[in-house]
Image: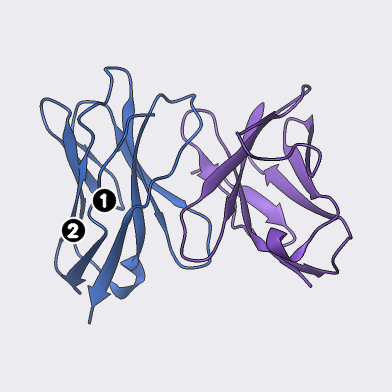
Chain colours: A blue, B purple
Amino acid sequence: DAKTTQPTSMDCAEGRAANLPCNHSTISGNEYVYWYRQIHSQGPQYIIHGLKNNETNEMASLIITEDRKSSTLILPHATLRDTAVYYCIGRNRDDKIIFGKGTRLHILP
Amino acid sequence: GAVVSQHPSWVICKSGTSVKIECRSLDFQATTMFWYRQFPKQSLMLMATSNEGSKATYEQGVEKDKFLINHASLTLSTLTVTSAHPEDSSFYICSAGEETQYFGPGTRLLVL
């Protein structure tokens, strides 16, 4: 798995877009960028993944830079239920997942 | 997304007893499942890779004789914590998936 670097914590006002950055400068060409989140006392929840192109689903958007060295997860309209630890992971699709420390996102009312 | 379940969701046991935790893939078959452990305020730590029909692969520092893994079918893996001690109290989580890994809701183990 590629090593990823994320801020320890972030705050975002409810209703605003939450932009979570991730640095993965050592990612290899066939490694995907995956995002998961873990709400307190629950198992991690899959959010989105991408290889080179930007991706969007019902939960979030993923913006990957052209050199693939970093990415940003965007929650377009954050709610209190989005308070969680967000993990950015670089991996081949068949590989095991090694979790880093993630970003603790606080949504402020 | 795919659904992974765990049973039980929480368990309390006495020191020295064994506890079995089940992980099931509900709507897909999984030749490989993963087991993680999470202590309070820490990230998930991978314990082992469970392989259907063959031996599990354990991460460095994880005792294979203490954490027995059985992957007897394509939809079920079990983790047995043998001779549990208070330091084994933790949140145990499994995952499964074909390309994207989906995680179970976790099992909270408290050893008294």
Which picture quadrant has residue A28?
Answer: top left
State how far apart marks 2 and 1 are (Cα): 7 Å
**Label 2, on which residue?**
A76
Q: Quadrant of residue A71?
A: top left
Q: Amino acid at mark 1?
A: Ala
Circle 2 Cα neighbour tier, 10 Å, few/some/many (<14 / 14–19 / ≥20): some
Residue A85 in the image: state x and y as whole percent. 36, 60
Residue drawn at x 25%, y 49% is A6
The disc labelled 2 sits on which kind of residue? Answer: Pro
The residue lying toward the viewer, choosing from B14 and B96, is: B14
Callout 2 and callout 1 share a chain: yes
State the SS at label 1: loop
Q: Is residue A14 left or right of residue A47?
A: left
Q: Position of residue A47 (x, y in %)?
A: 36, 48
Residue B66 in the image: state x and y as whole percent. 79, 44
First in sequence: mark 2 vs mark 1 = 1
Farthest left residue?
A66
Q: Which mark is residue A60?
A: 1
- Identify the subunit bearing mark 1: A
Q: Chain of mark 2?
A: A
Do callouts 2 and 1 mark residues in contact (Cβ within 8 Å)? yes
Note whether residue A21 is visible: yes
Q: Is residue B51 left or right of residue B14?
A: left
Taking depth in this image into account, of B38 and B60 the one nearest to the observer is B60
Q: Is residue A3 left or right of residue B81?
A: left
